[in-house]
Image: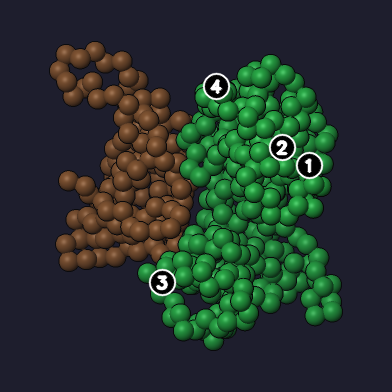
Chain colours: A green, B brown
Amino acid sequence: MSEINHEILEKIDDYRWRIPKSYKPGMRVPGIIYADEKLLKDIRQDKALEQVANVAFLPGIVNASLAMPDIHWGYGFCIGGVAATDIENGGVISPGGVGFDINCGVRMLKTNLQYEDIKNKIKDLVYALFSDIPSGVGSKGDIRVSAKEEEEILVKGAKWAVEKGYGTQEDLECTEEYGAIQGADPAAVSDRAYERGKAQSGTLGSGNHFLEIQVIDQLYDRDLCDEFGLNLGQITLMIHSGSRGLGYQVCDDYTRSMVHCLEKYNINVPDRQLACSPVNSPEGKAYLGAMRAAANYAWANRQCLMYLTRKVFEKIFVCSWQKMGMELIYDVAHNIAKLEKYNIGGKEKSL
Amino acid sequence: MQYYELLEHTADIGVRLKAKDLKELFENTALAMFDIMSERKSPDPRQSVGAPSHQSPAEKIIVKQDADNLEELFINWLNELLSLSSAKELIFTDFKINKLSETALEATAISENIADYKVNTEIKAATYHQLKLEPINSGWQAEVIFDV
């Protein structure tokens, strides 16, 4: 059960709720939760609200500790938690805040197939996907890479995969950051992380990661669907995966080092999983470089997974993926930290 | 008898353990972690006399960890085992803490090939979130949440 006193929640409007700064001494900003009454009922059941308040302790945090409607209990940050810190004002970065699975994300592909076209092939498709796409814990892929290539993946991301023939330029254009965030530092990634990552390129992983064949049964935004070429009954594919063992190791390595930063930089956080360091400190910069490298690994990985998926469909339908219209709609990360510029109180700031 | 209990958590897995002393607590938490992750594929042939042994032999790995305090040591120990298990493709099946202080440990971990195991749950890491490590009347108790 939640520890937070729910009476403390202030209603801003039908879809926003505030945890005032006065809730806990040490909060630098209020918490704001985006949810309606119905969602809030579930949210109150676990400890996610307490975590929103904890994130408000981070030095340099701007305006509010935010939680999106998918908010639920995680570790450190709640799942669905978002925070921006002001770099010039001692703003911090927290590996535990980004999470162990750096650049965990999803990509969605469309097809020009209808449910009717595949309904008799579903069994074959599922068997082929299971056999051709390595999944499960510690799964290893057929796409094996040398240490030198791995370093290249960490810099080039999905572009590495496209150069290898596992996709097209158009795929990159439909990927966040074109599949490679700039500023990755492969040297900031430990040998152990390399070791964990080497065998796992092109593998899905386990837990809540998945590859799904989906059918569109409802259109919420007609205009947007027209734009993307999506219609009722159409088959789409969703791939959910991240940076695998390489990312977990980067998070573990830097959480270890940043636990020491709490004392070094005189930072007070109520949960050590929020261990952090100023973005401009040597520790913060090293983590940012390593995190970007892990993020690029994840984009390369999802590109490889999409390639393997296209191959499976080609095998089952004896038709090229281009003819089946298996184009990437978009790939987006949901566990990541980025430097972006925003106008805060009339001043442009790097957050 | 189950030596650990699962704690309620929305997205992850938490465990609570009791042990007679700190060494046993460190050993049993590691055991619980690998018990949640994996199960042996077939009955252990060493337990039935005369059965042919086809599995790869167990290997001993010495694990050393340092930290600033006991809680960090505990988390570092668990995460080091997860990291070794994934990098070297092993499942750990037994642990013996040889030396333990507030800030350092040395342990022997017995590992087997991951191919002999069915892995059910991937544990990404042990976290500090809501971590408890405390003395109780009969020894020590720990609560830890794993990211799965």
- Residue A117 can be seen in this image: yes
- Residue type, mark 2 in image: Lys
Q: Secondary structure at mark 1?
A: loop
- Which of the two labelled residues, at mark 3 and mark 1, occupies the earlier sequence position? 3
Q: Chain of mark 1?
A: A
Place of residue B50 in the rendered image (x, y in percent of width and height, measured from the top left): 16, 13
Determine which residue is flagged by label 2: A110
Q: Secondary structure at mark 4?
A: helix
Residue shown at the point (69%, 63%) measured from the top left: A279
Question: Which mark identifies residue A213?
Answer: none
Position of residue A224 relative to residue B86, above or below, is below
Place of residue A164 in the rendered image (x, y in percent of width and height, measured from the top left): 76, 25
**Mark 2 or mark 1, whichever is nearer to me:** 1
Label 1 Cα neighbours within 10 Å, binned few <14 / some 14-19 / many ≥20: few
Tell me the CA gap for discs 4 and 1: 27 Å
- Which of the two labelled residues, at mark 4 and mark 3, occupies the earlier sequence position? 3
Looking at the image, which is closer to me, A165 or B84?
A165
Q: Residue A128 sits in which quadrant?
A: top right
- Which of the two labelled residues, at mark 2 and mark 1, occupies the earlier sequence position? 2
Tell me the CA gap for discs 2 and 4: 19 Å
- Residue type, mark 1 in image: Gly
Determine which residue is flagged by label 1: A229
Determine which residue is flagged by label 3: A2
Q: Chain of mark 3?
A: A
